[in-house]
Image (cartoon, helix red, strand yellow):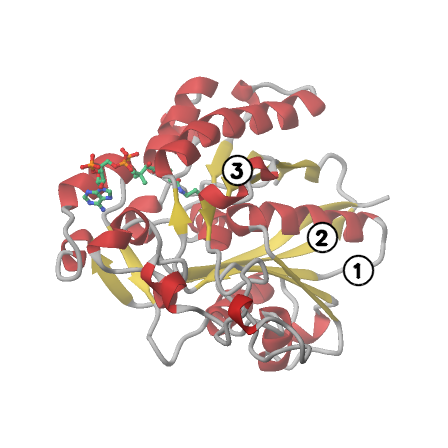
Amino acid sequence: MPNSRIAGVGYYVPKNVFTNNDLLKYMDTSDEWIQERSGIKERRYADRLGETTTTMGVEAAKIAIERAGITPQDIDFIIFATLSPDYYFPGCGVLLQRAMKMKEIGALDIRNQCSGFVYALSIADQYIKSGMYKNILIVGSEKHSFGLDFSTRGRNIAVIFGDGAGAVVVQPTEKEGQGILSTHLHSDGESAEILAMYNPGTHANHWVQKPVADFDDAEMGNLFMSKDMVEKAQNFPNMDGPAVFKKAVIKFPEVVMEALEKNKLSTTDISLLIPHQANLRIAQFVQQQLKLSDEQVFNNIDKYGNTTAASIPIALAEAWEQGKVKEGDLVCLAAFGSGFTWGSALMRW
Ligand code: COA
């Protein structure tokens, strides 16, 4: 059974830079508050009309595919992770397949928010190991800027998120000891609503049209999104920041240790930990808990904010470009986010 390895990495971020001070035009906040709480200095926002989650994903994919030494026609499976798709349905996978003129291959869209990339990698790993596919493209891409509440009401969330895309190509490797050593996925839906966007969604008692003639009109709305939902900002993401922080700082170290223990390795063996870029303070806390040096942890949230499913592949591609990920290195990816879902992947580069 072959191992799977990441054979090419790429990322794309929009050219529009929004500094913390730029956000002052829309909301009551400050550069100091944002930097102190999150470590973020600036983020990128996609063009309002020209760029979508898919178009950014395509740009990242082009680079990853070229670096893997193949062409888009060689890709035999797509996994697209995002929480900000171009359409409610179909997913971005088929839009990318069309845009890149790929063959009639399978395209899987997954919705695991900040853990999306680690979940996608785990799926790709199994397909490669089983021999089913040879060149899997994983894309994590987000256009958060289209759906954030930029008023003061939404400031606790709006300041954190940014747009961008990252991609990798996963291939089999016969080289002894190389590739993905293990992946570990978890979830706990108990607190699903504390980091969520509720609407539009089927939980709400709203119908576009009366389904049956004798249904009580008083119980029914005729709107997809009611005035009440909009007034309560339920059409925007909702987050209990402190609760997310508390859970994240427990689960990140736990899932890193799970990966190390599974492979009989220790924290000193890690060449580079790439945590999902949720918040610099979370990453620093995790670093401290695991007693890792600055050289062992990669962060770039200061430039891009939290790009959810895109954050790990963007960071991985940037680290690789900077020569911080080399052949033989032990690389650990770890994610935590909405759901809650969390996971890790340990690989020998
Ligand atoms: N600018 C200025 N003030 C802000 C603000 C902003 N952008 N956002 C919130 N505040 C205010 C709040 O209104 C509150 O004011 P009050 O004390 O008068 O009520 C105060 O700052 C503290 O709010 P709180 O939410 O308790 O702040 P915090 O110290 O927990 O920091 C986060 C907020 C969001 C930065 C922090 O909780 C966090 O990073 N959590 C994890 C979030 C995360 O990683 N999410 C993604 C997971 S994948």
Q: Position of residue 177 (x, y in %)?
A: 73, 34
In the image, which is nearer the foreground, mark 3 or mark 1? 3
- Quarter containing ligand 1? top left
Query: CB of mark 2 within 8 Å of CB of mark 3?
Result: no
The answer to whether residue 251 is seen in the rendering is yes
Relative depth, front residue between 133 and 71: 133
Front residue of this view, candidates 21 and 349? 21
Nearest to the eye among marks 2 and 3: give it.
3
User: Which tag, 2 or 3, sits closer to the chain's start?
Assistant: 2
- Which disc number belongs to residue 284? none
- Residue count near mark 2 (Cα–Cα under 10 Å), binned few <14, some 14–19, many ≥20: many
The residue at label 2 has a CB less than 8 Å from ligand 1? no
Residue marked by disc 3: 191
Residue at the spot x=47%, y=38% of the render? 275
Position of the N terminus by quadrant: top right
Marks 1/2 in contact by CB < 8 Å: the verdict is yes
Q: Quadrant of residue 232?
A: bottom left
- Relative image position of residue 246 (x, y in whole percent): 42, 28
> The C terminus is located in which quarter?
top right
Q: Looking at numbered disc 3 in the image, what kind of residue is underneath it?
A: Ser
What residue sits right under mark 1 in the picture? Answer: 133
N-terminal label among 3 and 1: 1
Work out whether residue 263 can be spotted: no
Residue nearest the observer in this picture, 223 or 63: 223
- Amino acid type, mark 1: Tyr
Q: Residues within 10 Å of mark 3 (few under 14, many from 20)?
A: few
Comes first in the chain, label 1 or label 2: 2
Task: Residue 168 in the image: state x and y as whole percent.
Answer: 58, 57
The residue pinned by badge 2 equals 124
Query: Element under label 2?
Result: helix
The local secondary structure at tag 1 comes to loop
Q: Report how far apart the C-alphas of labels 3 and 1 lie in the structure.
A: 36 Å
